[in-house]
Image: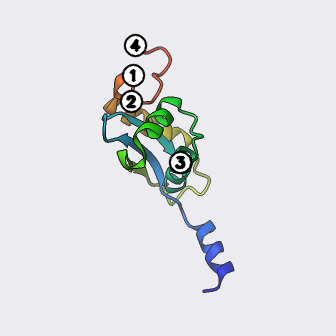
C-alpha cells in the first residue's frame, strides 16, 4: 500500500474512544480523563508532561520530581459507537462514562490530580 492510501485508511478508521488514567505508581495518585481518541490523548499527555507543559500543575510537578518511570498510562474503559447511527455524537456518553470512573476511583485531593466536581464535598 502506498503512503497516501495508508494515511487515508488511518483517517477513515475509528479511533478507540473512552476513559484513561495516568497513575503515579509511587504515590497511587491518578489523573482520569476521557477522549474521543484515547491513543492520541495519551500520546498528547505524555508529550505535555515530557516537555513540561501539562496544564495540571500538580501532575506536572510530580512528573518533574519523580520522572517518567514513576507513571503508567492506561485505558480504563472504551466506548463503542453504534453502527446504525452514522451521526452519533459520543460527547454525552463519554461524560457519563468518565463520571462513573471518577466516582469509582475518586482521584481527588490526596488520591489524585482531578479537581472535584463543582457542588461536591
Q: Please, is residue 12 above or below residue 79 in the view? A: below
Front residue of 68 and 114 = 68
Q: Which residue lies furthest to the front in this view?
A: 65
Residue shown at 31% from the left, 38% from the top: 26
Q: Residues within 10 Å of mark 2 (few under 14, many from 20)?
A: many
Q: Is mark 4 on a helix, strand or loop?
A: loop
Q: How far apart are marks 4 and 1 (CA)?
A: 11 Å
The residue labelled by disc 1 is 109
- Contact between marks 1 and 2 (CB within 8 A): the answer is yes
Q: Residues within 10 Å of mark 1 (few under 14, many from 20)?
A: few
Q: x%, y% of residue 66?
A: 40, 40
Which callout, 4 or 1, points at the residue further toward the start of the chain?
Answer: 1
User: Which of the two residues, 75 or 92, is positioned nearer the viewer here?
Assistant: 75
Farthest bottom residue?
1
In the rendered image, the quadrant that contains the C terminus is top left
Instruction: Name the residue tied to disc 3.
Output: 50
Measured as percent of width and height from the top left, residue 23 is found at: 37, 41
Q: In this view, does 13 lie to the left or right of 67?
A: right
Q: Position of residue 9 (x, y in %)?
A: 60, 73
| Circle 1/circle 3 CB separation < 8 Å | no
Give me the C-alpha separation between circle 1 and circle 3: 23 Å
Residue at left 44%, top 30%? Answer: 113
Report helix, strand or loop for mark 1.
helix
Which numbered circle lies on residue 112?
2
Judge depth for marks 4 and 1 and give the one in front: 1
Q: Mark 4 points at which residue?
A: 121
**Mark 4 or mark 2, earlier in chain:** 2
Marks 1 and 2, how far apart at CA: 6 Å
Comparing labels 4 and 2, the label whose residue is closer to the camera: 2
Quadrant of residue 22 within the rendered picture: top left
Which numbered tag is attached to residue 81?
none
Amino acid at each position: 500500500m502506498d503512503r497516501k492510501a495508508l494515511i487515508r485508511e488511518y483517517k477513515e478508521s475509528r479511533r478507540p474512544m473512552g476513559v484513561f488514567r495516568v497513575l503515579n505508581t509511587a504515590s497511587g495518585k491518578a489523573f482520569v480523563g476521557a477522549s474521543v481518541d484515547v491513543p492520541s490523548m495519551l500520546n498528547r499527555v505524555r508529550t505535555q508532561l515530557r516537555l513540561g507543559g501539562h496544564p495540571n500543575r500538580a501532575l506536572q510537578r510530580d512528573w518533574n520530581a519523580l520522572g517518567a518511570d514513576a507513571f503508567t498510562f492506561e485505558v480504563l474503559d472504551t466506548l463503542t459507537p453504534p453502527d446504525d447511527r452514522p451521526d452519533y455524537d459520543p460527547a454525552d456518553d463519554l461524560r457519563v462514562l468518565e463520571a462513573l470512573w471518577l466516582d469509582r476511583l475518586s482521584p481527588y485531593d490526596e488520591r489524585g490530580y482531578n479537581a472535584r466536581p463543582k457542588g461536591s464535598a
